[in-house]
Image (cartoon, coloured by chain):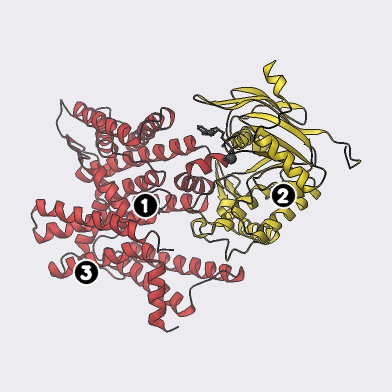
Chain colours: A red, B yellow
């Protein structure tokens, strides 16, 4: 088989996986051209990453919610409400940062368990249960901020989560660059290559089909170059932000859980066929509790990231986050039919959605058109899902 | 009567099982006995209650009334996991597979092999599960290109093979098969019947539901006929196949009924 034919075949077989990467590249390429390179500047990319953070963590949780055939509309105002609670704990109760964060994450889990109690115990459709949550948390947010209006958070440690960067190694080489970020980028590449190579060896020893050698090398080079480029761009500004660290940690942990653990397997089984899962001894109820509980915790995290980024809790925080998160999950390849979708896809989907906003803002496009463009992208993602479902791998 | 000299004792006993679905009385007080190392054929017309009765035994349905005994001990199943723990496995009529997962994942669904435990979270041993699945499929002599194929890509017969592989993977004491040959070719049916004989030789007790009376005749030791949610016949399988078939059909269509008085009394 010729190289081009092989590439074609691979693309066709894996179009569902590669589709969102292609979309992200196209979008970034187009904005880089239309903004004369401003879009791809270190400063803008860092901003983009920090803006993606609070949507990305929601999208990760939302992906699992959609995988088990549910939806959660309450996450936006829950994030806003819990961000305000964190602000109150820090400003009025004078709690230490770690305690305020743990408290709010705990409240998030409780909120998620409440939702799943309605869904799993009473059998209320999640659409309705979480619409009630949407209303309730919106009211709660307004109550918390009613007397004070916007709560300014004068806490450097807390605000660093959304605005700060990891410290650098104090040595004199490459004064313009953030050395630790470059080092981490290098480490990432090395770990990636090692794991890919050992994985390929293992697959071959079990006689499973693997990518042809040239293709495999091309993939390694391509992804390594991508990681290197991202590290380089970030290092050119102030390095890796704390938000990026948080998001990467969430994505890595959730990726591990969903692909490597029994819990992850059961989540996908429930999404694929709840009756079969139940007959195999998996408790659909328990999985529902776990998935919504995690969604609540990630909503709290999103609220913390957002409040920290704005250095304040506002009366409208979290507005429309849920729609961005749902859109990001769908762009990231989750399927409305359930059982299909990866958390790494959610991260790419969130990057696509914030890239659109960021790029169109830079171009000075009217907000009304921005909504319409984002609507088209979401529609395209779902059409893509439906039309490739039976041809993909 | 008994052609073998083995002494037989019940491994499963169902007594007076009743199950209603709204106004539908699917089971009206059924008794069923399965002996150790016996192959029991369960037959009856459509909607007779065969699947419902077996789902009561597999823990999928909780009966409205009646008792379940395993080796003389009364048990209550509140979920399929309870029944699996007692060594009861079932091949469901609609296979109960998760289409989005691959063959190995389906065979080990709910029983994943764990290689490392991190608190409540178990890390799966993919390699072990894939190798085991290969062996199981080989035993069934069913050809599936890779255990990593998603089940949605399989043919009806292959799906059925996966469901059978799952039920036979864990050295179950009691294996229930609800129409295991319905989607299979003649050659594949022979393999399943062979497998049933092998499982029996290995010590398992088996209940097989089938509309193919010749299958029941060839592998079964005893037959129970259900009709309208009641047991109407229970006897060893003997005689020639034509006589057997006539007898089974007579009970299935209601021309004969061994237990009528009991219910009237
Ligand atoms: N989950 C359910 N909800 C409502 N009714 C049910 C349910 N399961 C079975 N029934 C009813 O119970 C009766 C017995 O059904 P069952 O599936 O046990 O029959 P069966 O003997 O297995 O038939 P078949 O040979 O067609 O598989 C039928 O009238 C059926 O409609
Ligand atoms: Mg049936």
* Measured Cα–Cα span from mark 1 to mark 3: 27 Å
Crowding at dot 1, Cα within 10 Å, few <14 / some 14-19 / many 20+, comes out as many
Question: Which image quarter holds the C terminus of chain A?
Answer: bottom left
The local secondary structure at tag 3 comes to helix
* Measured Cα–Cα span from mark 1 to mark 2: 44 Å
Residue found at the very far right of the displayed protein: B5
Could you say where residue A90 lies in the image, as x and y percent from the top left? Answer: 27, 33
Instruction: Please determine if labels 1 and 3 lie on a single subunit.
Output: yes
* Residue B34 visible, this orientation: no
Q: In this view, does B186 lie above or below A36?
A: above
Q: Which of marks 1 and 3 is nearer the N terminus?
A: 3
Which residue corresponds to the image point at 58% horizontal and 35% vertical from the top-left?
B60
The local secondary structure at tag 1 comes to loop
Disc 3 vs disc 2: which is toward the camera? 2
Tally of numbered tags: 3
Disc 1 vs disc 2: which is toward the camera? 2
The local secondary structure at tag 2 comes to helix
* Measured Cα–Cα span from mark 3 to mark 2: 67 Å
Residue placed under numbered mark 2 in the picture: B214
Instruction: Please determine if labels 1 and 2 lie on a single subunit.
Output: no
Residue placed under numbered mark 3 in the picture: A29
- Tell me the quarter of the picture where residue B131 sits: bottom right
Instruction: Report if the beta carbon of the residue with label 3 is closer than 8 angstroms to ligand 1.
Output: no
- Tell me the quarter of the picture where residue A78 sits: top left
Instruction: Please determine if labels 3 and 2 lie on a single subunit.
Output: no
């Amino acid at each position: 088989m010729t190289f081009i034919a092989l590439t074609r075949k691979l693309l066709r077989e894996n179009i569902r996986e590669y589709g969102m990467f292609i979309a992200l590249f196209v979008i970034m390429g187009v904005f880089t051209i239309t903004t004369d390179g401003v879009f791809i500047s270190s400063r803008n990319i860092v901003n983009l990453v920090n803006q993606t953070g609070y949507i990305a963590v929601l999208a990760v949780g939302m992906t699992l919610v959609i995988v088990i055939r549910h939806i959660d509309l309450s996450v936006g105002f829950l994030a806003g409400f819990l961000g305000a609670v964190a602000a109150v704990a820090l400003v009025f109760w004078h709690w230490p940062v770690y305690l305020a964060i743990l408290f709010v994450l705990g409240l998030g889990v409780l909120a998620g368990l409440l939702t799943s109690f309605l869904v799993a115990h009473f059998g209320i459709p999640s659409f309705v249960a979480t619409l009630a949550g949407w209303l309730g948390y919106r009211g709660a947010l307004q109550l918390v901020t009613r007397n004070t209006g916007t709560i300014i958070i004068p806490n450097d440690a807390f605000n660093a989560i959304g605005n700060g960067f990891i410290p650098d190694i104090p040595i004199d080489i490459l004064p313009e660059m953030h050395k630790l970020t470059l080092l981490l980028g290098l480490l990432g590449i090395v770990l990636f290559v090692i794991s890919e190579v050992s994985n390929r060896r293992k697959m071959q020893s079990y006689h499973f089909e693997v990518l042809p050698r040239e293709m495999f090398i091309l993939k390694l080079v391509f992804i390594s170059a991508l990681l290197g480029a991202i590290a380089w761009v970030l290092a050119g500004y102030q390095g890796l932000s704390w938000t990026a660290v948080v998001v990467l940690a969430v994505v890595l942990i959730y990726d591990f859980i969903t692909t490597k653990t029994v819990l992850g397997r059961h989540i996908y089984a429930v999404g694929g066929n709840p009756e079969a899962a139940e007959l195999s001894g998996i408790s659909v109820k328990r999985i529902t509790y776990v998935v919504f509980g995690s969604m609540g915790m990630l909503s709290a995290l999103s609220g913390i990231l957002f409040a920290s980024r704005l250095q304040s809790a506002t009366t409208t925080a979290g507005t429309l986050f849920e729609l961005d998160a749902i859109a990001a999950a769908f762009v990231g390849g989750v399927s409305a039919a359930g059982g299909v979708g990866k958390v790494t896809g959610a991260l790419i989907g969130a990057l696509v959605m914030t890239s659109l906003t960021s790029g169109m803002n830079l171009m000075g496009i009217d907000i009304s058109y921005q909504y319409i463009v984002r609507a088209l992208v979401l529609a395209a993602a779902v059409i893509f899902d439906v039309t490739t479902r039976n041809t993909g791998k | 009567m008994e052609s073998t000299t083995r002494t037989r004792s019940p491994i499963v006993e169902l007594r007076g099982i009743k199950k209603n679905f709204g106004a539908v009385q699917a089971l009206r007080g059924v008794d069923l006995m399965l002996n150790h190392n016996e192959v029991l054929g369960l037959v009856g017309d459509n909607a007779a209650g065969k699947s419902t009765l077996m789902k009561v035994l597999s823990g999928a349905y909780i009966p409205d009334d009646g008792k379940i005994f395993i080796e003389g001990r009364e048990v209550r199943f509140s979920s399929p996991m309870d029944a699996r723990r007692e060594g009861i496995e079932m091949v469901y009529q609609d296979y109960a597979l998760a289409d989005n997962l691959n063959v190995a994942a389906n065979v080990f669904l709910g029983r994943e092999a764990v290689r490392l435990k991190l608190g409540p979270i178990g890390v799966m041993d993919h390699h072990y599960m894939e190798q085991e699945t290969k062996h199981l499929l080989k035993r069934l002599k069913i050809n599936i290109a890779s255990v990593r194929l998603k089940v949605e890509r399989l043919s009806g017969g292959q799906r059925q093979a996966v469901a059978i592989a799952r039920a036979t993977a864990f050295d179950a004491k009691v294996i229930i098969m609800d129409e295991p040959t319905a989607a299979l070719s003649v050659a594949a049916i022979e393999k399943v019947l062979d497998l049933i004989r092998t499982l029996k030789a290995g010590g398992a007790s088996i209940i097989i539901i089938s509309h193919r009376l010749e299958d029941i005749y060839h592998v079964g030791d005893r037959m129970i006929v259900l009709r309208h949610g009641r047991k109407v016949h229970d006897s060893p399988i003997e005689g020639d196949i034509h006589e057997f078939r006539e007898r089974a059909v007579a009970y299935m269509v209601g021309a004969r009924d061994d237990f009528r008085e009991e219910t009237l009394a």
